[in-house]
Image (cartoon, rainbow, N blue to C red):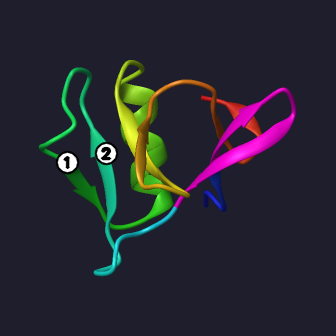
Amino acid sequence: MVAKIERIIGGIVQNRVEPDEHGYFHCLPQGSNMHPILKANLDEVSDWLRANPKGGVRMNPTWTKISRNIFIDGLPR
């Protein structure tokens, strides 16, 4: 069970995956910022990110699409 998905640069957490106001996580295919694939939990997000290495996920702060330097429970995607 995945506990956290983060963007880490230089050993410092920059962003974290968090759900939207409805409880969904937004995964985005390569080249898209407009058509999210909604996931219900971090396990689904993790599976999607591993299957789509050039895809990204919205992270806070700023709700930005992140596709690089993603770590799942402290390990590189």
Label ID, residue 57: none
Label ID, residue 36: 1
Side of 3 relative to 20 (left or right)? right
Which residue lies most toward the right here?
11
Q: How many marks?
A: 2
Residue depicted at x 19% and y 30%: 32
Residue flagged by tag 1: what amino acid is it?
Pro
For disc 2, the marked residue is 27
Side of 3 relative to 51 (left or right)? right
Which residue lies most toward the left here?
35
Q: Nearer the viewer, residue 44 or 15?
A: 15
Magenta segment, prevailing SS (helix, strand or loop)? strand
**Alpha-carbon distance for marks 2 and 1?**
5 Å
Residue depicted at x 48% and y 44%: 46
For residue 73, above or below residue 22: above
Residue depicted at x 31% and y 45%: 27
Residue 7, located in which quarter of the rendered image?
Answer: top right
Membership of 40 in magenta stretch? no
Sequence-earlier tag: 2 or 1? 2
For residue 7, above or below residue 76: below
| CB atoms of marks 2 and 1 within 8 Å | yes
Report the span colored magenta: 6-17
For residue 21, above or below residue 44: below
Circle 2 — which element?
strand
Residue 70, located in which quarter of the rendered image?
Answer: top right
Relative image position of residue 39 (x, y in whole percent): 30, 59
Residue depicted at x 62% and y 49%: 15
Quadrant of the rendering where the C terminus is positioned: top right
Relative image position of residue 18 (x, y in whole percent): 49, 64
